[in-house]
């Protein structure tokens, strides 16, 4: 799967917090410079998706984009950097703005920086 509804999708390989098993999750992404940005929206659910919880435990991941795999480090964005990227993300995919409007949690934005 390389797109979903016309939006680009990557597969995040994370290590499960409880089991240590590798979990694969397709997520819409946006590129900005050399970094990939994903949003832990979970459709506006009151809880973060499990892949976000997994990243909190281990920020080194494997990303898969159109069959190409690369190692990356994940960083949760805060402050000005988060605000700046959030504006770009909601212009890229307006659904993110809706998801934020239906939940009280601050939806996490994750920057993935490739290591290869």
Image (cartoon, rainbow, N blue to C red):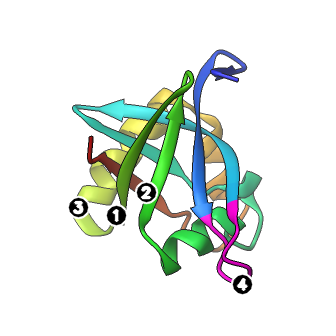
Of the numbered discs 2 and 1, the one sitting upstream in the chain is 1
**Can you say which quadrant of the picture contains the N terminus?**
top right
What residue is shown with label 1? Answer: 77
Q: Position of residue 2 (x, y in %)?
A: 63, 21
Residue 89 disc label: none
* Disc 4 to disc 2, C-alpha distance: 21 Å
How many residues crowd around disc 3 within 10 Å: few (fewer than 14), some, or many (20 or more)?
Answer: few
Of the numbered discs 4 and 1, the one sitting upstream in the chain is 4
What residue is shown with label 3? Answer: 80
* Disc 2 to disc 1, C-alpha distance: 6 Å
CB within 8 Å, label 2 to label 1: yes
Of the numbered discs 3 and 2, the one sitting upstream in the chain is 3
Q: Position of residue 8 (x, y in %)?
A: 56, 24
What residue is shown with label 2? Answer: 110
What residue is shown with label 4? Answer: 18
SS at circle 4: loop
How many residues crowd around disc 1 within 10 Å: few (fewer than 14), some, or many (20 or more)?
Answer: some
* Disc 3 to disc 4, C-alpha distance: 33 Å
SS at circle 1: loop
Span colored in magenta: 15-22
* Disc 3 to disc 1, C-alpha distance: 9 Å
Q: Nearer the viewer, residue 79 or 5?
A: 5
Of the numbered discs 3 and 4, the one sitting upstream in the chain is 4
Of the numbered discs 4 and 2, the one sitting upstream in the chain is 4
């Amino acid at each position: 799967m390389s797109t979903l509804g016309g939006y680009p999708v990557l597969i995040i390989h994370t290590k499960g917090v409880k089991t240590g098993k590798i979990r694969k999750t397709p997520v819409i992404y946006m590129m900005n410079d050399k970094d990939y940005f994903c949003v832990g929206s979970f459709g506006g659910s009151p809880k973060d998706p499990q892949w976000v919880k997994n990243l909190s435990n281990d920020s080194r991941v494997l990303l898969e984009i159109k069959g190409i795999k690369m190692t990356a480090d994940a960083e949760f964005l805060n402050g000005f950097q988060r605000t700046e990227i959030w504006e770009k993300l909601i212009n890229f995919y307006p659904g993110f703005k809706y998801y934020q409007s239906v939940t009280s949690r601050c939806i996490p934005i994750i920057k993935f920086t490739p290591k290869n």
